[in-house]
Image (cartoon, rainbow, N blue to C red):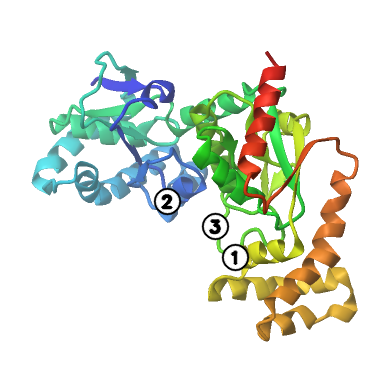
Amino acid sequence: MNIPSLSYQEARPLLGLRVVDVRTPAEFADDHIPGAINFPLFENDQRAIVGTLYKQESPEAAYEKGLSFVEQRMGGMLGEILGVPVSREEWLPKFRKLVPLVQSLKPEKALTLPLPENAILIHCWRGGMRSCAVIALLRELGHSQVFHLDDGYRGYRTWVRGQLENLNPETPLVMLRGSTGVGKTRLLHRLEKVFPGTTLDLESCASHRSSILGAIGLHPKSQKSFESAIAQRLVEMSAPPWFVEGESRKVGDSVIPKNLFQAMESGAHVLVEASDAFRVKILGEDYASTPESLRELRDRLPFFEHRIGMEWKGKLQEWLDQGEWPKVAQALLDLYYDPLYGRGDVRREWTGRVNAESGKILEELEQIRKEISEALR
């Protein structure tokens, strides 16, 4: 049977293409193609059972157990993919007819482009039996709009790595640096609204604010998901120079790709400054604006109390419980954040300085970007 296949590079620009990921929920959670829908062929525990059988008994035993799991799930899964119910009487005979052929199914290059408007791209980890079985059954049922992703998620990861490795480490960047709480991330968001395609927000890509408190109210991404977000953003952006927030090599637990970090270190560094009152306000909005975030914040305060001195044990928590967030924030700035992060910027050469409270800050930053761009011509 012909299983028409597309590479991710070919599939990415196609408008209206639905992407269905049949990997387990755990695989999907670790990383997935943006916009993909997860209709797993195996649940997490089922895949573990199949893997154990493969290692401890035989590939044949694993294959038979996998088929039994697939048969249990296939009817509901077909309905989810197509958006309409598929009766057991309709799909089961065709499925059993295909079973002896599943291991021999081979994807082939799709010859019909453009694809139909309702096209569905289906993939598993490496474009093997999981996705081929689903596609073959759907096509047997008369749904010719289903296609295979060449090399599956693994092929997508190859594309992601290519985007990151092909980034020139000398790409001109305008690095926004400054003390904690000056609002660098918010500044990136404002710049993006006025000058679309000029910003790379790494903290958004990581879903982490890049500090001990950085995960409060967020759900940090895996390394692979972080890299996916960066790769997708890179192809959306206009020509550099780009605005990027200054970071260490890691954003939370996510490591910034090598070429990008080299470009960041050699970029034009702009110091963003603000009053303490402004910084305390920003920190309050980021970390102390909801009951849930306040609970998470309180759980982390012992770390800071231990770092700044034993005489502070319980003090920051007491202030927070009393509703005195500004005192907590000011203490964190004076005794922890400014001494810690200030050291890293002492020896930097500054291309410019801007004030976060200025009404002209966007124009000032865009002027710096234009000057860098003109100097490169």
Q: CA distance from mark 1 to mark 3?
A: 17 Å
Q: Earlier in the sequence, mark 1 or mark 3?
A: 3
The residue under the point 57% across, 23% down is 239
Q: Are marks 1 and 3 in contact (CB under 8 Å)?
A: no
Image location of residue 65, percent across then percent down:
35, 47
Determine whether 320 is above or below 336 in the image.
below
Question: Residue 25 got which mark?
Answer: 2
Image location of residue 300, percent across then percent down:
70, 70
Q: Are marks 2 and 1 in contact (CB under 8 Å)?
A: no
Q: Nearer the viewer, residue 119 or 197?
A: 197
Residue annotated with mark 3? 219
Q: Residues within 10 Å of mark 1 (few under 14, many from 20)?
A: few
Is residue 172 shown left or right of residue 7? right
Question: Residue 285 got which mark?
Answer: 1
Q: Are marks 2 and 3 in contact (CB under 8 Å)?
A: no
Residue 15 image-quadrant placement: top left
The residue under the point 56% across, 47% down is 204
